[in-house]
């Protein structure tokens, strides 16, 4: 069935908000920034539709309940925080295995207890990365809905991993392959040179987990997508053919309400006053999200690419994201003087949604995490794409090759190419065309949330779908 058909054929009308409140939903966010944000945004949306919300969460990267007074927070007990293997990016694979193994007993106990409470549990909504929770939902007879925090093409690329394995691609790549523009047959969007980063430095571990993720999504009752139909037209026929569950494309989740306080790091607001003093569309925003790191040499290349472009920039340098450095100590004094000259501003963490919405921002040098990409599209900000690993490679392909709303750094992080890309995007006529396209997409995406728009209708359908679960209202 076409997922958009699912979204438009449900006939029931929304019930009054107050009447849903007795219907409790338990949401299980995955404890990383790029996953916490969309899950709490979803929680807010469902709360606004009248549902009662319980957030079941790890101690590690726990959301701050004070910032979300409408939700009930339940920590998963018994798993020692210091044991979580999260000290580096390579450990993300271990983290996912660890959580899906060590936390399952405690998660089941919590859910069992909640089921016995007066409110009961109408439905469990988990991040896809909690792939092992399906068996708990089955045992407890809870409907499980998956929140997929990235886009549809990413999911389908993950689903193509067995094909990649059959073609012999789950391995390390040669330098020649890392430069190859050949398309990967069967996964046409990706080029051979994307595969190495797509599969990370641990291709076997990453591919196994991607498969587990897809296997964990398949039996779920439904999937909530933080994306919009209009961005996914190419992928929807394949999605509905290969995964005939119920699909609700209700994004962009971050646009329903003003930015949430779900940031794990303190957002430095001083950059907004700095942006206020800059000319419209003049500043390049630079950020590689919450996880990706760079080598020290790459950091230097970015620094000099930015400086040489002569374009003002706002740069997020997350402490610990440069290998071997705490923060900026590897920058030469001369460089910092250049920044003091007024061309640049560096922060440890920014209020990104506000930054991207600021009139002064004219471009975004990004790792193409899905949240960042969607936030950029929603504000009409064109991108310079430098994906680091996993889903970011697929998303960057969409940005540069399908939507054509960004330019790609083909040779990694190299100062001359960075300088050239900034000029292409922010000074050349090509940049104007790219900006026109992203503004066009911005309008389409933001219209989806208006009455009658695709996400608006899909959300109505989701609400009615959840209310239809037996025992949903106690
Ligand atoms: C990773 C994956 O790359 C991403 O594709 C996946 O969907 C989630 O996990 P991450 O590196 O965290 O994500 O990037 P991204 O998805 O872009 O999320 C980062 C979030 O942090 C965004 O919501 C962004 O607004 C926020 N952010 C980022 C800040 O609030 N301040 C900053 O300075 C930088």
Image (tube, rainbow, N blue to C red):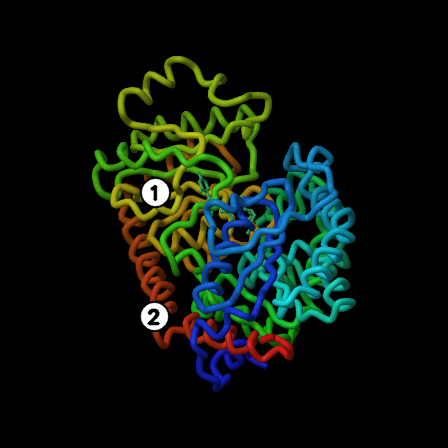
Residue 355's tag is 1
* Residue 335 place in picture, x, y as percent: 38, 18
Mark 1 or mark 2: which comes first in sequence? 1
432 relative to 134, above or below: above
Q: Secondary structure at mark 1?
A: helix
Picture quarter with the C terminus = bottom right
Picture quarter with the N terminus = bottom right
* Residue 51 place in picture, x, y as percent: 51, 67
Task: Kindly indicate the quadrant of the structure image that contains residue 178.
Answer: top right
* Residue 42 place in picture, x, y as percent: 50, 60
Residue 450's tag is 2
Camera-nearest residue between 369 and 255: 255
Q: Name the residue: 56% across, 72% down.
A: 247
Considering every residue shown, the one lying at the far top of the view is 333
Q: Is mark 1 within 8 Å of ligand 1?
A: yes
Camera-nearest residue between 82 and 223: 82
Q: Is residue 135 visible?
A: yes
Q: Name the residue: 45% across, 54% down.
A: 399
* Residue 419 place in picture, x, y as percent: 38, 33
434 relative to 295, above or below: below
Count of labels shown? 2
Q: Name the residue: 59% across, 59% down.
A: 27
- Image-based side of 211 in relation to 436, left or right: right
Give how far apart the Cα atoms at labels 1 and 2 are.
24 Å
Residue 330's tag is none
Q: Secondary structure at mark 2?
A: loop
Q: Name the residue: 51% across, 54% down.
A: 40
Camera-nearest residue between 365 and 142: 142
């Amino acid at each position: 069935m076409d997922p958009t058909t699912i979204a438009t054929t449900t006939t029931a009308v929304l019930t009054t908000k107050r009447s849903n409140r007795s219907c409790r939903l338990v949401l299980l966010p995955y404890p990383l920034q790029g996953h916490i944000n969309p899950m709490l945004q979803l929680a807010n949306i469902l709360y606004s539709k009248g549902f009662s919300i319980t957030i079941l969460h790890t101690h590690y990267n726990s959301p701050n309940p004070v910032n979300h007074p409408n939700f009930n927070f339940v920590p998963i007990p018994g798993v020692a925080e210091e044991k979580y293997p999260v000290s580096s990016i390579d450990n993300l694979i271990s983290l996912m295995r660890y959580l899906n193994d060590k936390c399952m007993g405690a998660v089941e106990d919590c859910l069992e207890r909640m089921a016995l409470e007066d409110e009961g549990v109408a439905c469990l909504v988990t991040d896809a990365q909690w792939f092992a929770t399906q068996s708990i939902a089955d045992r407890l007879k809870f409907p499980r809905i998956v929140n997929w925090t990235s886009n549809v093409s990413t999911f389908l690329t993950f689903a193509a991993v067995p094909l990649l394995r059959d073609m012999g691609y789950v391995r390390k790549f040669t330098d020649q392959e890392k430069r190859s523009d050949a398309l990967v047959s069967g996964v046409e969007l990706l080029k051979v040179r994307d595969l190495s980063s797509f599969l990370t430095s641990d291709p076997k571990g990453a591919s196994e987990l991607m498969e587990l993720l897809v296997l964990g999504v398949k039996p779920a009752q439904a999937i909530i997508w933080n994306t919009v139909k209009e961005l996914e037209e190419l992928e929807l026929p394949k999605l509905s053919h290969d995964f005939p569950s119920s699909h609700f494309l209700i994004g962009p989740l971050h646009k329903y309400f003003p930015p949430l306080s779900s940031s794990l790091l303190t957002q430095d607001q001083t950059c907004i006053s700095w942006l206020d003093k800059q000319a419209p569309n003049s500043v390049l925003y630079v950020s590689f999200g919450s996880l990706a790191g760079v080598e020290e040499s790459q950091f230097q290349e970015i620094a000099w690419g930015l400086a040489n472009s002569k374009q003002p920039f706002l740069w997020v340098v997350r402490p610990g994201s440069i290998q071997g450095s705490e923060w900026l100590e590897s920058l030469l004094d001369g460089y910092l003087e250049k920044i003091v000259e007024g061309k640049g501003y560096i922060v440890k963490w920014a209020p990104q949604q506000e930054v991207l919405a600021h009139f002064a921002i004219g471009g975004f040098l990004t790792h193409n995490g899905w949240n960042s990409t969607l936030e950029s599209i929603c504000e009409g900000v064109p991108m310079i794409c430098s994906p680091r690993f996993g889903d970011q490679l697929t998303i960057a392909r969409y940005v540069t090759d399908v939507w054509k709303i960004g330019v790609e750094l083909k040779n990694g992080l190299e100062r001359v190419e960075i300088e050239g890309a900034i000029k292409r995007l922010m000074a050349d006529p090509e940049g104007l065309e790219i900006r026109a396209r992203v503004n066009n997409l911005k309008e389409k995406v933001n219209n989806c949330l208006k009455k009658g728009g695709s996400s608006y209708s899909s959300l109505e359908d989701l609400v009615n779908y959840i209310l239809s679960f037996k025992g949903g209202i106690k």
